Structure formats: structure tokens, C-alpha cells
Image (spheres, rainbow, N blue to C red):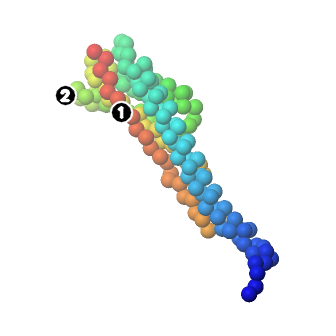
Amino acid sequence: MRGFDARDQSGQMAVELALLMPVVIVVALVLYNLLRFVCVCGEFDRVAPNAVLSQGGCATGARTGVVAVGEVRSRIEDTLNAHGSCSVEVEASRIGHAAGKEPLSLASLPVRFTCTLEYRPWPASFVMAGVVYDAPAFLRHQKVMVVDSN
């Protein structure tokens, strides 16, 4: 009976490491993007309502929905500092309002703000030793708020 010889297994650890390392790197990239997205969503959920209430909710004079959307968007983008791109939509909920005929005044209508955060994962794709990491084009998170300035 032959005893244990260390020379028989001299390269096994290097081979196991070479096979395991691409999988570890892909799992690390997935976790990095997931944690970053969760952090950006948490900040977005805190910033978006404040921006809508402070910029979109105060109806002074003949303020239009287009002006409010621009102010809310710029406030959110300034606060997030390029973590993701934001888009804000405004919809009026009064029945009988003819859309497109005159600028929508925020003074008398409840307005629905839909704030959307789009996060683009990094890197978009990654291939190492046959292990493929292919992230989605972007991850989307929405926050909907209704403001009535009356």
C-alpha cells in the first residue's frame, strides 16, 4: 500500500483556483451592482419626495407643469450627482381639461409626479474563462407622488 505523497497533488490547488476565480469575480460584480443600486434607490426615495414637495408643490403665479418638471428634475439630478439618470413626468387629474390647448397651471389642479431612476450597471458585460456576466441595460425604480396645492 502506497502512502500519501505531496508531489501527486502539487498543481491541484492552482487548477481549482483558476476554475473558481472567474465565478468569484462575476458574483462580486453582481453584488457590487446590487448594493450600489440599493444605495442609489434609498437616496432617490429620500430626495424625490422632497424635490416634488418643495419645487413642484408650490404653485406661485402662472407656474406651468413644464416649469415644475424641469425644477424637480434638476433638483433630483443635483442631489444624486450622476448616480443615475432621472426623468420626471407630470399629469393633471382634473376631468375636462383640454390637453395641449393652454399651459397647465399647477395652481388649481392635483398633479401626479412620476419620478423614475434609471441605473446602468457597470460593466455592461464581462467574459473571463468561459464565465459570462451580462448585465441588463438599466435597472429602473419609480416613485409616484400626488400634490394638491389647494
Q: Quadrant of residue 17?
A: bottom right
Please state, as top left, top right, bottom left or bottom right, where the N terminus lies in the image.
bottom right
Amino acid tagged 2:
Gly
Please state, as top left, top right, bottom left or bottom right, where the C terminus lies in the image.
top left
| Residue lying furthest front | 1
- The residue identified by callout 1 is 144
| Residue lying furthest bottom | 1
Position in image of residue 130 (x %, y %) = 62, 68
Position in image of residue 55 (x %, y %) = 43, 20
Q: Residues within 10 Å of mark 1 (few under 14, many from 20)?
A: some
Instruction: Tell me: residue 47, above or below residue 34.
Output: above
Task: Depth check: give the residue in front, 124 or 132.
Answer: 132
Instruction: Tell me: residue 44, above or below residue 19.
Output: above
Residue located at (50% from left, 51% from top) = 137
**Side (left or right) of 129 relative to 96:** right
Per the image, label 2 sits on a secondary structure element best described as loop
Position in image of residue 99 (x %, y %) = 27, 30
Residue located at (43% from left, 40% from top) = 141
**Side (left or right) of 15 relative to 28:** right
Residue 112 got which mark? none
Instruction: Tell me: residue 125, above or below residue 119.
Output: below
Q: Residues within 10 Å of mark 2 (few under 14, many from 20)?
A: few
Residue located at (52% from left, 37% from top) = 40
Residue located at (66% from left, 61% from top) = 21
- The residue identified by callout 2 is 96
Amino acid tagged 1:
Val
